[in-house]
Image (cartoon, helix red, strand yellow):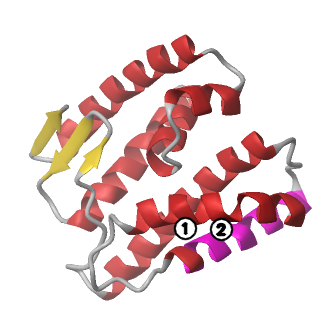
Amino acid sequence: MEDLFGVVYDELRVLARRQIARLNPGQTLSPTALVHEAYVKLADRSRSDERLRDEQHFRALAARVMRQVIIDYVRRRSAHKRDAGIRVETMPDVAIRGGGPDEDLLAVDQALSELERLDERQARIVELRFFAGLDVDEVAATLGISDRTVKREWQKARAYLYDALRHVSHDVDRF
């Protein structure tokens, strides 16, 4: 895994910068810290139960772990400071407004967890598109499915999340 981590380290930093860009200017989580915390979680995971198959599989796991790290970060900040947090302005094709920034991101995470219980592949697609910033072709390659399937499942997942978030937030817009 260390060899694979070295190969995709720069790419993970780019993904981390995208995630950090959603944080308020006063936040303390850096892209390097996010990548390193993700690495620790990935290393623990690879020792326990899951073997990495290839670079695409590594990216998929990294997206999931970055999501977990960011959600943990938001929860810790919320416990210490009610008004701090992450600005979730837009998820491709779904924008969330209303409530606090932390609440919005936690609502996205909860809705995504619910989607995962209903359709794991759709949840992976959202995770890869939103948290890893992959495009349709990259998601298709990572999951080993066609780009048409990704587009179809992405559309269904967006509809589900829109509906789930509409009940949480007062003002949810579609792209």
Residue matched to label 2: 38
Q: Main secondary structure of the magenta part?
A: helix
Q: Nearer the viewer, residue 134 or 128?
A: 134
Instruction: Give coordinates of residue 112: x percent, y percent.
Output: 44, 42
Seen from the viewer's position, the closer of residues 78 and 94 is 94
State if disc 1 and disc 2 touch (CB < 8 Å). Answer: yes
Answer with the quarter of the image where residue 87 lies.
Answer: bottom left
Q: Nearer the viewer, residue 157 or 130?
A: 130
> Which image quadrant: the N terminus?
bottom right
Tag 2's secondary structure?
Answer: helix
Span shown in magenta: 33-48
The residue sitting at 53% across, 40% down in the picture is: 134
Instruction: Indicate whether 115 appears above or below 21.
Output: above
Which amino acid does the dot numbered 1 rest on? Val
Image x and y of residue 138, in percent: 60, 33
Three-letter residue code for mark 2: Ala
The residue labelled by disc 1 is 69
